Every structure is written in C-alpha cells, then in structure tokens.
Image (tube, grey):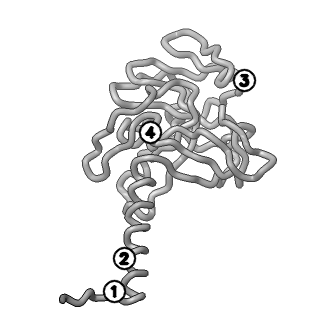
Amino acid sequence: MGKIKRKSVLREWIEAIVVALALAIFVRTFFFQIYKIPTGSMIPTLMPGDKIFVSKLSYGPVVPFFGWRLPGFTKIKRGDVVVFLPPQEENKLFFSRKHFIKRLIGLPNERLIIKNGNIYINGKIVIDPKIAKNNYVNAGFYGNEEIYLPEGKYFFLGDNSINSLDSRFWGMVDEKNIVGKAIFIWWPPKRIGMIE
C-alpha cells in the first residue's frame, strides 16, 4: 500500500499565496482596478482622497506587452471619466508609471478648440452638461488653437481646468494607453456614488 505524502504547512502556505497573487494580478489586469485620487484636477467630480473603482471591461482590457484591446461592453464616449497613461509616462519603467484620470473631450478624426471657456468640436459648441458645466482655460501648447485628432488619438481635460495638467500641455493619448472607465466612488462613505 502506497504512502500518501503530506505537504508541509509552509509549502501549502506558499502555494496558496502564489495562487492568490496570480489571481489578483489577473483580475487587476483584465477586470477592474482601484485608484486613489491624488490631486484636485477633477474637482468637483472627484475630490483628493476619493477612492474609485475603475472598470477595464467597459472598453475592453488591453493585453499586456502586445497592446491588443479585447472587446468591451461599451464604446469610449465623450464625457466619460477615464483612467489612462499620458504620453510623458509611456517610456518609463512599468513600475514607475503614473496613470492620470480626466474627462474625455475629443475623439479621433475631430477638430477641437477651446474658446471663451467652452469646447468646440468640428466648429460646434459642446452642450453635453457633463462638459458644458465647466469653464475651460486656454493654456499649454495644445490649448490655444484648433487641433486635429488623428485616428486612435484622444484628448482629455480636467473638470477643474485652472488646476489641471492635461492634454492642453502634453497632447493626445493613444487608444492603447486607455486603462478603463471610472465607475464608482467607494470611499469615503459620505462620497459614495456613481461617477458622472
């Protein structure tokens, strides 16, 4: 009769930890991620210290190292609050990159200009209340004249325009660098709610 080898307690713990880490990385890569808001660039929509839930499934997760976007549930839409990697962070080592969160303003194949505090797309003023409620300041290299967004490029602005480092300063974001849609504030308790 064969003997059943008993795993050591230490080995069982190590295997459990490895499996838990692999599962956490898989979920974080393909499903959702949690972020803490560090600055006031999105006031009043998001406040410094807010903890938010970001869905990667909304637009479809990006496969690491390949840059392929898997199918998502919705299309990337103007007015969405989005987490992304800005161009100045792209060439940094992956562990030192900083993700930004802003509102999506300009889509591929559009002409965009900021004029008198308003956004104009293809010559027409944007009336979407999520965007029109904010007063946008002409600033930065891309914030003072009309620009054209090529295929696969997006333009982001902070709701708190006067205190936001955004596409006006560093330009357009590649579609492959869009991480996910900000869905929900889950902390602090008095701020719990959907992100509009």
Which numbered disc flags the more N-terminal residue, 4 or 3? 4
Q: Is residue 18 above or below residue 160?
A: below
Dot 2, crowdedness within 10 Å: few (<14), some or many (≥20)? Answer: few
Q: Gap between marks 2 and 4, in whole Å?
A: 29 Å
> In the visual, does 43 lie left or right of 3?
right
Q: Does dot 4 land on a helix, a strand or a loop?
A: loop
Dot 4, crowdedness within 10 Å: few (<14), some or many (≥20)? Answer: some
What residue does disc 1 label? 7
Which numbered disc flags the more N-terminal residue, 3 or 1? 1
Q: Which residue is drawn at the image coordinates 38% and 64% (left, top)?
A: 22
Residue 18 figure quarter:
bottom left
Pair 2/3: label in front: 2
| Residue furthest front as drawn | 1
Which numbered disc flags the more N-terminal residue, 1 or 4? 1
Q: Position of residue 121 (x, y in %)?
A: 52, 16
Q: Gap between marks 3 and 1, in whole Å?
A: 62 Å
Q: Are marks 2 and 1 in contact (CB under 8 Å)?
A: yes
- Identified by mark 4, the residue type is Leu
Q: Gap between marks 1 and 4, in whole Å?
A: 38 Å
Which numbered disc flags the more N-terminal residue, 2 or 1? 1
Pair 2/4: label in front: 2
On residue 133, the disc is 3
Q: Position of residue 92 (x, y in %)?
A: 38, 59
Q: Position of residue 70 (x, y in %)?
A: 32, 37
- Identified by mark 2, the residue type is Glu
Quarter that holds the C terminus: top right
Pair 4/3: label in front: 4
Q: Are marks 2 and 3 in contact (CB under 8 Å)?
A: no
Q: Nearer the viewer, residue 55 or 159?
A: 55
What residue does disc 4 label? 57
Dot 1, crowdedness within 10 Å: few (<14), some or many (≥20)? Answer: few
On residue 74, the disc is none
